[in-house]
Image (cartoon, rainbow, N blue to C red):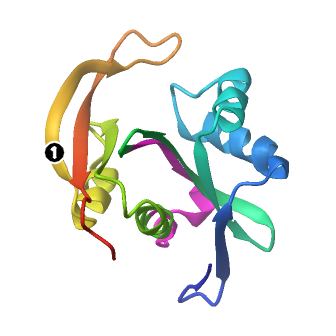
Amino acid sequence: MRIAFVFMKSIDIRPAYADDFTAMHALNLQSFREAWSEDAMRGALLGGFDVLVAAHNHVLCGYILSCDTVDEVHIMQLAVHPAWQRQGIAACLSKTLLQIKSTMACMLLELRASNGAALSLYQGLGFFVCGERANYYTARGVHDAENAILMRLNMEGKHE
């Protein structure tokens, strides 16, 4: 799928290739205080997690990583390179995943309570807040933990 942006840049949304791993892991380290280790990320990719990437001229701009459990999809990570943020890439990755997984019953995710941009994105896609996990996010060497907001989108019968 190719998406044209206002800035005349085109982005390809596609499944991740093995060659994307290094760039994905670098973006993971850059994006998350609680970044996954290289082994954990490689294990997820080899273990059947689904990964879509956004690329411009074969350069990775972002990715979304999800895992299916029976009839649910759990979004594990969504990351966009800082140079590409606020240009609709997170929304495009999310919408593409929603289209691909449209026959599943629901989609779930957690996000930092302080991440207003992500909360707005997912609410705009139809997700609703369904709970909270106390002290869910912790980072190595950081003593303060942050709560996670749980979000859900009921998809059964949705085929957009």
Query: Element at badge 1?
Result: strand
- Seen in the image, is 71 located left or right of residue 50? left
Query: Would you place residue 89 above or below residue 34 in this image?
Result: below
Q: How dense is the environment of label 1, judged by Cα within 10 Å: few (below 14), some, or many (20 and up)? A: some
Quarter containing the C terminus: bottom left
- Going 78% across and 51% down the picture, which residue do you hit? 20
Q: Residue at x 46, y 72 (%)?
A: 88
Magenta highlight range? 73-90
Amino acid found under the numbered disc labelled 1: Val
Number of callouts in the render? 1
The residue nearer to you, when weighing 8 against 38, is 38
Q: Is residue 126 left or right of residue 160?
A: left
Q: Is residue 75 magenta?
A: yes
Name the foreground residue: 24 vs 113: 24
Residue 152 colored magenta? no
Q: Which residue is mark 1?
A: 129
Task: Work out whether residue 108 or residue 72 is closer to the camera in this orientation and state it.
Answer: 72
Q: Residue at x 48, y 68 (%)?
A: 96
Q: For residue 129, which quarter of the picture?
A: top left
Quadrant location, the N terminus: bottom right
Residue 155, horizontal then vertical, whole percent = 26, 59
- The image quadrant of residue 58 is bottom right
Residue at 66%, 32% (x, y): give it: 47
Give the x, y percent position of residue 125. Answer: 28, 65
- The picture places residue 99, in percent across and down from the top left corner, at 43, 69
Quarter where residue 12 is shown:
bottom right
